[in-house]
Amino acid sequence: MLEDWASLHSSSESGSHTINEYAEAYGISGGQKNMESHIFSVDTLERHASKSHGVITCMSAGNNAILVGTNKGWLVRYDFGGGDNYELDLSISRTGDQTVHRVFVDPGGKHCLAIVLSSGGAETYYTYAKWRKPRILSKLKGLVINAVAWNRQQISEASTRDIIIGTMGGQLYEVVVEEKDKKEKHLKLLFELIELKEPFVSLQMETNATGATTRYYVMASTPTRLYTFIGTGSLDVVFAAYANRSIHFTELPGEMPSSELHFFVKQRQADFAWLAGAGIYYGNLNLGAPQSGSSNGDDNFVENKALVEYSKLEKDREGIKPHSLALSEFHFLLLFENKVKVVNKVSQKLIEELQFDREFDSSSREILGLCSDVTAGVFYAYDENSIFEISVHDEGQDMWQVYLDMKEYAAALEHCRNTFQRDQVYSVQAEAAFSTKDFMRAAFFYAKTNYIMSFEEVALKFVAAGEQDALRTFLLRKLDNLGREDRSQITMISTWATELYLDKINRLLLDDDKQGGETSSSSNEINTKYRDTLREFRDFLSDCKDVLDEATTVKLIGSYGRVDELVFFASLKEQHETVIHHYIQQGETRKALEVLQKPNVSPELQYKFAPDLIMLDPYETVESWMAASNLNPRRLIPALMRYSSEPHTKDEAHEAIKYLEFCVQRLQNEDPAVHNLLLSLYTKQKDESALLRFLQCKYGKGRSGKPDIFYDPKYALRLCLKEGRMRACVYIYSMLGMHEAAVALALQVDPELAMAEADKVEDDEDLRKKLWLMVAKHVIEQERGTKRENIRKAIAFLKETDGLLKIEDILPFFPDFALIDDFKLLETKAKETLMLISLDLSICRREKLDKVLCSGT
């Protein structure tokens, strides 16, 4: 079977791509990453970026706008988004050194805070994107600001809204600056470090609005600690809550003068990274977390925390720490002197080193720092003179491989870009499961691959391991992954799976036989597996009935002796004749009738199997016929005759008569054959009453153009004569107008019946008299009493004729010794009595006639 399928599969796949062709279609060489491609690249963006206003001391970026601060108190703006570029002098009217200590621009690139340090103290300037003149924020005078957290969800062009600033003195303030008023709206102290006086050097803030409620998530770092705050309401309410409970912080050893804190938020992903003395402390942010009342407050929104030690990144230079940090979706960008090392956040492995082209300016010192434009998704580096752009080129392209190497298969699949990559993930999972002998799991994953391993290779692996159950699972799952265009493969795989199912069923039966029929847990387990496999096999046949070759499948199932499954499959393929024949052989009449009652079964099968079915179970068969609406009773006559020819017990209901009566009475069938058959069955019954009722009932009366009766009277007469049904013969003679024969036959059965028949003739007086004379002769000749008694009875009979016969008409029937005087004497004495009797007879004669015919008395 395997060799056959392999041949078919190879021929049908001749037009398909090879593995290498498929890989090349996706730009992948041999399924591995192209080592010449780089995720990050660095280019010089601006040379002499300070515009001859000293050297660069700090830089910030947002929405394609870059603001550079110099040591001579100048602020230079570059807008690569279509805005204006300009230079602002922040040292006007002051003498001495005027160094721009920090510059901060919001994510939208509109609002900017610049902190200038001079001998006179610290000044904070606010400038807007369209302004040419900065404004001093007087309320912030003297505060050396090291960090700003923008409320990016609520900020607008007209207002910074509530932002947090962190100072050299260890304070956190809330401030709002309005562009229209050109000054700060208010300044509130939110928090101050008391226990350990350290400067706040970095701040980040995110908010999550639910209805009218806003929840704040704030992180603030010092050179040695990372503080977390969470709460709802306004910022002052959030921080006021920490007056009554402990403030959670994370402390890491080691000095880090250039400590930095960064957030990366993109759709449902939110990460943080803190450049600390001991390494990069990072994790995920759960921005849906509620406020916690415990001292371990960050546990509600800081998750999956980890630490990357610097020694792993600079193995040859111990103690070297990065100067600056930037955070992307999947990577850390770490600035070491004059190079940037790119470290994968997931694997914590170094993937690239970026070198800066600085040969044009040998006087430049080392790179000072990195900054991120979270809105534009780019990064920048700067030295004293120049700005460098670090571009990102599809940084998630190899994340599937990263997760795969870490055996995080679900994450690897989530990051796959094409079928070839998914194939590699499934293949690794399958090989891992196979190596641990988890064959069923291996089969599941092998079935999902398309190009890494051929179908034949996988199948042979399971065959070699003797794992037929796993092979069957592999085939079934492979079927799920094939398309309609792969019909030949589907048919072959389905056939192979059929054989594996049959083999499994037979092996379970053999295992059960080995148990010797004993009741044990092992035997019960085998029986359970057998039933489950059988049920699963039938489900499989139901699913694959349209793709399995019918002849091949029937032959295969039959070769294993699985008659019930053969019948089941025949039923699925609507081979109703085979199914019905099987049920009849098994004596299962009801099941056969259920098949016949299906709407898509041809009525021809009803007629074909009718003789067998009615012999097996007359009652159920006839009930089924009566429930059907599309049967022709004439075509069931052979079955009814066969059934009727068999002997029946005295108490057994005659189902053929029941069905024919249903056809005649309920269905108003007019077929003479049906009526004649019913009549013939009636003639065989001992009780003649049903036959007489049938003969007298005029089923065609009142139907336009139809005769009163549908049976053949002559045929009925022959049957009745043959079976000795004389009363019925009398009725038929009378119906045919053969009144003399009717009276003659009636005299043999019952003189009263003969009288009734004679009295029927009303329109022919001579015939009526003749008939009565026949009756009179019979009555007189049958009497054996005394002379006077015979005469008395004869006179009484004359009264029955209602004057039709006279005494002289019947005298010839008496013997010669009878005297007329005797008649006269009796007539005189009984005259009055006979007159009364004659009156009564004339009234009751008609009623009596009907009663005689119907009752036979």
Image (cartoon, grey):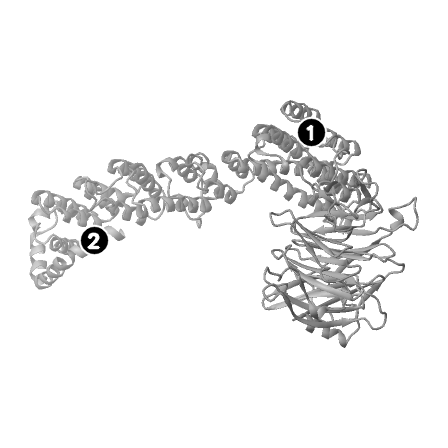
Circle 2 residue: 850
Coordinates of residue 446 in the picture (x, y in percent): 72, 37
Residue 10 appears in which quarter of the rendering? top right
Nearest to the observer: residue 803 or residue 684: 684
Q: 629 and 538: which one is in front? A: 538
- The circle on residue 324 is none
Query: Which kind of residue does numbered mark 2 sit on?
Result: Asp
Q: In the picture provided, is 16 more to the left or to the right than 808?
A: right
- What residue sits right under mark 1 in the picture? 24
Q: Is residue 353 left or right of residue 686?
A: right
Q: Is residue 415 left or right of residue 613?
A: right
Task: Identify whether 226 is placed above or below 572.
Answer: below
Work out whether residue 534 can be spotted: yes
SS of the residue under disc 1: helix
Q: Earlier in the sequence, mark 2 or mark 1?
A: 1
Q: Residue at x 46, y 42 (%)?
A: 598
Q: Position of residue 26 (x, y in %)?
A: 67, 33
CA distance separating discs 2 and 1: 105 Å
Query: Which residue shows up at 76% across the image and 76% down it?
Result: 243
Q: From what the image shows, is residue 365 above or below residue 506?
A: below
What residue lies at 70% left-to-right and 29% top-to-bottom? 19
How many badges with numbers are in the image?
2
Q: Secondary structure at mark 2?
A: helix
Q: Residues within 10 Å of mark 2 (few under 14, many from 20)?
A: some
Quadrant of res 711 = top left
Looking at the rendered structure, the kind of residue marked 1 is: Glu
Residue 282 location (% of width, % of height): 79, 55
Asked whether the beta carbons under mark 2 and mark 1 sit within 8 Å of each other, the answer is no
Res. 605 image quadrant: top left
